[in-house]
């Protein structure tokens, strides 16, 4: 499962429920920002508009769209009539959402209790989870889920074979939310398939779950059944739980990585897995990173783009198909305001608002009108209005400053959302009759 959060947000744990302070993306030159967060995965998609309505499209075998059916939807359909949705998150086959009144809702597959309603019954429409009204944010893993409340407490539920829930047990699924520890200062959590990472308000890093490749970062390969503090640093800003490796950026601009490293995706100059965080080069100007299946991208504060790891399809963009074990600059004058690493391809937006893509292109996921792989960035069209992008496994989402929303690539389950199941080799505009002011877009 590949997930991407492109733009960060900070959860205020000292204010009332749903006090979200959104940090907008870096703007392209002379553009205004209308899209705040995009998030990419595999086969179903969710969107929240600025009017608070919820929309969904794509695969629906377990009711994960929430439209009371299990019918695939090849174009966005509104879910219910409520206009108070604030945030959503998608797992492999289930979905979570929080409304402006602080209530938590879930729908879709529920075989491991990942919906949190106390049952293992599949739900084809959103169902309220409990009666609490202080949920702030949620994060859906493959088959388990997390939520943080306005008091800073962390809660988890669902599949727990590897201790990824963090409640001190393993092989015991939780069918309703259980509090993880007794702390009141959680600010963010990243749920992988088998392990989880979290950062507290004091800047400390915590990890738990499966650890065969050292992806927890505690210096061992022992799985952990409850959150364990990683190191002694108190300046972690953001972390990302990949399938088998992890990345993080600290407030001093340093980049750190740990876990599986067979393709050099950690970027430390080796292919040795690392059981604890290692600093990647000595630079102190990293601002954002994005992890693909086996490759990674990063942008520094000067706008330069860097890449490392697997490169079989040219997904690094350095004009070769040779894997790189340390960050290499992409081009001599190539600068980005945002990047997103898909499964085997990559996307970037330059300061002038142009969109670029490189890597695998078998389903047209680059968007340049062909299915030929590209080992260097190629421009996608000529528009200078792109402000946000999200690269999924084989398809992508993008938003422009005029409020329009675009999609392209693999479309077998209708995940592009253009009303067909035909792969799209170039971006197609959705809602062509008018610009739609999307606030949040998620794909799974």
Image (tube, rainbow, N blue to C red):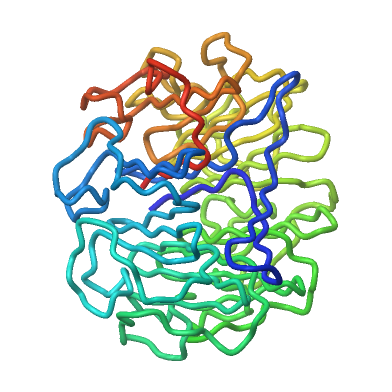
Horizontal side, residue 408 vs residue 341: left or right: left
Residue nearest the viewer, comparing 411 with 70? 70
Residue nearest the viewer, comparing 81 with 364? 81
Residue nearest the viewer, comparing 90 with 184? 184
Residue at 80% across / 67% down in the picture?
Answer: 235
The quadrant in which residue 279 appears is bottom right
Horizontal side, residue 387 vs residue 303: left or right: left
Is residue 376 shown to the viewer in this render? Answer: no
Residue at 37% across / 70% down in the picture?
Answer: 144
Residue 221 screen position, x and y as percent: 52, 79
Residue 212 screen position, x and y as percent: 46, 74
Is residue 221 shown to the viewer in this render? Answer: yes
Horizontal side, residue 359 vs residue 271: left or right: left
Q: On screen, 399 above or below 121? A: above
Q: On screen, 223 above or below 23? A: below
> How many discs appear?
0
The quadrant in which residue 417 appears is top left
Residue 32 screen position, x and y as percent: 69, 25
Residue at 54% across / 77% down in the picture?
Answer: 154
Residue at 62% across / 77% down in the picture?
Answer: 151
Residue 431 screen position, x and y as percent: 37, 22
Q: On screen, 245 above or below 416? A: below
Horizontal side, residue 284 vs residue 100: left or right: right
């Amino acid at each position: 499962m590949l997930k991407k959060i492109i733009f960060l947000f900070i959860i205020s744990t000292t204010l009332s429920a749903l006090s979200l302070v959104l940090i907008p993306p870096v703007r392209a030159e002379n553009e205004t920002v209308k899209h705040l967060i995009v998030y990419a995965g595999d086969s179903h998609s969710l969107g929240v508009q600025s009017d608070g309505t919820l929309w969904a499209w794509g695969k629906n075998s377990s009711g994960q769209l929430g439209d009371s059916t299990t019918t695939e939807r090849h174009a966005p359909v509104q879910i219910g009539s409520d206009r108070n949705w604030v945030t959503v998150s998608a797992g492999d086959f289930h979905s979570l959402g929080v409304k402006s009144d602080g209530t938590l809702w879930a729908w879709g597959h529920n075989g491991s209790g990942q919906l949190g309603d106390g049952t293992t019954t599949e739900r084809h429409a959103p169902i309220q989870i409990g009666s609490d009204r202080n949920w702030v944010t949620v994060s859906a893993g493959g088959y388990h889920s997390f939520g943080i409340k306005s008091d800073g407490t962390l809660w988890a539920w669902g599949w727990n074979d590897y201790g990824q829930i963090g409640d001190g047990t393993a092989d015991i699924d939780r069918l309703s939310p259980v509090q993880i520890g007794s702390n009141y200062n959680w600010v963010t959590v990243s749920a992988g398939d088998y392990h989880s990472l979290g950062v507290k308000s004091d800047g400390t890093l915590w990890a738990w779950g499966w650890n065969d490749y050292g992806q927890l970062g505690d210096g061992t390969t022992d799985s952990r059944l409850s959150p364990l503090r990683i190191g002694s640093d108190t300046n972690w800003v953001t972390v990302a739980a990949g399938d088998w490796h992890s990345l993080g950026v600290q407030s001093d601009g340093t980049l750190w990585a740990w876990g599986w490293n067979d393709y050099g995706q950690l970027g430390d100059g080796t292919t040795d897995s690392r059981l604890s965080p290692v600093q990647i080069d000595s630079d102190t100007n990293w601002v954002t990173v994005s992890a693909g299946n086996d490759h990674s991208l990063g942008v520094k504060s000067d706008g330069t783009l860097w890449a490392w790891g697997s490169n079989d399809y040219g997904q690094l963009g350095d004009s070769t198909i040779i894997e790189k074990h340390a960050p290499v600059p992409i081009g001599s004058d190539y600068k980005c305001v945002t990047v997103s690493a898909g499964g085997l391809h990559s996307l970037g937006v330059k300061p002038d608002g142009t969109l670029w893509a490189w890597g695998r292109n078998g389903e047209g996921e680059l968007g340049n009108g062909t299915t030929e792989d590209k080992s260097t960035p190629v421009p996608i069209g000529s528009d200078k209005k792109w402000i946000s992008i999200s690269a999924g496994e084989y398809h992508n989402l993008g938003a422009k400053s005029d409020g329009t929303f675009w999609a392209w690539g693999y479309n077998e389950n209708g995940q592009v959302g253009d009303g067909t199941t035909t792969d799209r080799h170039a971006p197609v505009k959705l809602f062509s009759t008018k610009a739609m002011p999307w606030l949040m877009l998620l794909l799974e």
